[in-house]
């Protein structure tokens, strides 16, 4: 299957119409079968380098549409940067402060003994774990 076909299959599986822009971005996100952690800016740069004509606003809107359809998970960092992860199961992440990269951390090593009590009438929908790192010294 070509990267474009993989992207089309990914979109169709979520019931999204495969527009030209969606197909171009999906090809970059899942075309090689690898999981990705991207920002809108990094995906926009990748698309532009490949000759895909897509605006940054379209990239933002498309990533949010992919997330709403369950194709990606949005991970908000520092209040002004969001990463979008193509791996949608619950898993922790490493955030590499020196490079700004977000990568998967081993899920099998994560343990919670308890969580704080929730306010009345609330339920947990998800627990995000981001382990921020930098080199010692």
Image: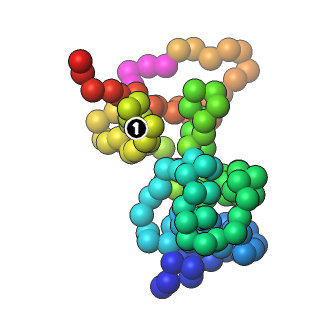
Residue placed most toward the observer, 99 or 104: 99
Dot 1 surroundings within 10 Å: few (below 14), some, or many (20 or more)? few
Taking 118 as reference, is 125 above or below it?
Answer: below
Report the quarter where the C terminus lies.
Answer: top left
In terms of image quadrants, where is residue 93?
Answer: top left
Taking 31 as reference, is 134 above or below it?
Answer: above
Q: Residue furthest left?
A: 137
Which residues are drawn in magenta? 111-115
Residue 104: x and y, percent? Answer: 39, 45
Q: Residue furthest bottom?
A: 1
In terms of image quadrants, where is residue 75?
Answer: top right
Read off the residue under disc 1. 99
Q: Residue at x 68, y 14 (%)?
A: 119
Residue 131: x and y, percent? Answer: 40, 29
Q: Residue at x 63, y 27 (%)?
A: 79
Q: Residue at x 29, y 36 (%)?
A: 109
Colouring method of the image: rainbow
Identify the secondary structure beneath mark 1.
loop
Residue placed most toward the observer, 125 or 17: 17
Residue 28: x and y, percent? Answer: 54, 67
Q: Main secondary structure of the magenta part?
A: loop
Taking 76 as reference, is 31 above or below it?
Answer: below
Residue 93 visible:
no
Residue 57: x and y, percent? Answer: 76, 52
- Taking 52 as reference, is 17 left or right? right
């Amino acid at each position: 299957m070509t990267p474009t076909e993989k992207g089309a299959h990914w979109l169709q599986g979520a019931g999204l119409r495969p527009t030209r822009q969606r197909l171009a971005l999906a090809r970059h996100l899942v075309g090689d079968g690898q999981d990705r952690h991207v920002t809108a800016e990094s995906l926009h740069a990748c698309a532009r380098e490949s000759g895909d004509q897509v605006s940054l606003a379209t990239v933002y809107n498309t990533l949010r549409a992919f997330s709403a359809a369950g194709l990606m998970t949005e991970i908000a960092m520092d209040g002004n940067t969001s990463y979008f992860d193509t791996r949608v199961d619950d898993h922790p992440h490493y955030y590499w402060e020196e490079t700004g990269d977000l990568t998967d951390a081993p899920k099998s090593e994560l343990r919670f003994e308890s969580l704080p009590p929730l306010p009345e009438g609330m339920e947990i929908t998800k627990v995000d774990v981001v382990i921020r790192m930098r080199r010692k010294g």
